[in-house]
Amino acid sequence: MTTHAPGGGGDLSVRANELFVDAAYTGSQSNGSQGAPFNTITEALAVAAANDLIIVSPGAYTEDLTLVTGVDLKALIPESVTVTGTATATD
């Protein structure tokens, strides 16, 4: 995410915290990094804050999600993620 300072006074770059999800990850430790992604979107949402980006690896995810305001979800590869379940929003 890039924001611009008012009045065109240059760029102020703000990078979202990126959290990774991969249901196929079999490592013993998951911390949301690209090398040790969470196994579920729910795990990533539990630690996400406003301006964070959750990047979801290809696959099918069956879970009920509580979406967090200001947190974006993105498929690593467009049209490669299927989520089955319910979604509710929270502030």
Image: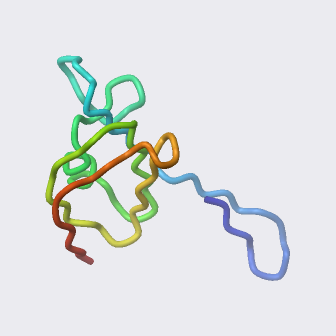
**Residue pictured at 52% horizontal, 47% vertical:** 78
Picture coordinates of residue 39 (x, y %)?
23, 35
Classify 80 as above or below 23. below
Q: Is 79 left, or right, of 58 in this rendering? A: right
Residue at 20 percent across and 65 percent down: it is: 66
87 or 34, which is in the foreground?
Answer: 87
The answer to whether 11 is drawn above or below residue 18 in the figure is below
Pinpoint residue 13: horizontal percent, then vertical percent: 67, 57
**Residue at the far top in the pictured view:** 27
Q: Quadrant of the N terminus?
A: bottom right
Q: Position of residue 27 (x, y in %)?
A: 23, 17
Q: Is residue 25 left or right of residue 58?
A: left
For the C terminus, the quadrant is bottom left
Q: Quadrant of residue 46?
A: bottom left
> Which residue is painted at 38% across and 32% down in the image?
33
Q: Is residue 73 left or right of residue 3?
A: left
Q: Is residue 59 above or below residue 9?
A: above
For the point 39% across and 37% down, the residue is 58
Q: Quadrant of residue 65?
A: bottom left
Say which of 67 and 16 sits in front.
Answer: 67
Foreground pick, 47 / 82 = 82
- Left or right, 58 with respect to 86, comes to right
Q: How many marks?
A: 0
Q: Quadrant of residue 31?
A: top left
